[in-house]
Image: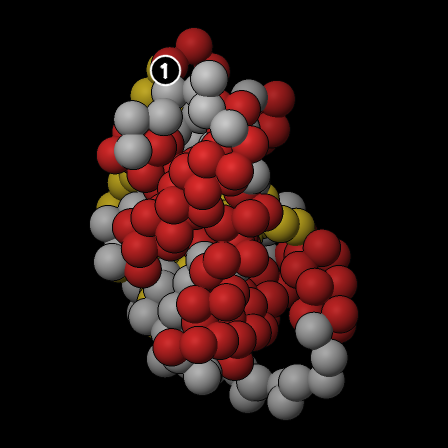
Amino acid sequence: MASQRERQRVRQLIAVEAVRLLSEGGLSSVDAARRKAAQRYGCADQRQWPEPSEIVAAWAERQRLFAASGAHDLQRLRRVARDVMGLFADLDPELVDGVATGIADAHTRISLRLYADAPEQVVFRLLDRRIPWQESERRLLFGGRRREARPAFRIGAEGADVEIVVLRPADRADPPRDPATGRPAAALGLAELAALLAAAGPQPRSASGT
């Protein structure tokens, strides 16, 4: 049986490897990175894996050591997300993926979800604001390992790349899942995001490019 010291060493190695995988841009999910890192070290016992919060902390430390602008970039992206979410406040916007979890750098895409009866609600809003967009689809994982497509819109906002996925109102009862864990993906509502920004301290208000 591995000693406590050895288990802690493996736990730290997995956290470092997960951060490396995330920094290379191949993965955006903390759980997916943690799982892949654990596979590399042959650790199948999830009790020995670092908690997601430990990986987020390791990422923050990496940014502090190697990217002086890391914290600033994250706050900037979150402020842009807040501004865009504010345009769709009546559609229950949510921030997901890296900018929500804190695993983000200056080039990370802002991923938002809205709930609307029809994607035209988003189109009309973008037209009203004269915001150019590109329309596509995103295939998402739902309960029962079911995959379904949902409309998606790509826009630019204050130099950031923003993707808006339009969910159906019924998706609230069965939200998209994290492919790595099968659990509902972490998401921040507008009020939660505003609270995080407030806790981070005073920041200059971005001039809305939207």
Q: Is residue 60 above or below residue 185?
A: below
Residue nearest the viewer, comparing 56 with 197: 56
Is residue 63 something one can see in this rendering? yes
Q: Which residue carries the number 1 mark?
A: 146
**x, y percentage for residue 192?**
71, 55
Rendered image quadrant of residue 144: top left
Q: Is residue 64 left or right of residue 17?
A: right
Q: Is residue 109 above or below residue 145?
A: below
Identified at 36% across, 61% down, the residue is 109
Q: Is residue 113 above or below residue 31?
A: below
**x, y percentage for residue 31?**
44, 36
**x, y percentage for residue 143?**
47, 16
Colour scheme: secondary structure
Residue nearest the viewer, comparing 3 with 208: 3
Q: Amino acid type of disc 1?
A: Arg
Identified at 31% across, 55% down, the residue is 20
Identified at 49% across, 58% down, the residue is 58
Residue nearest the viewer, comparing 90 with 40: 40
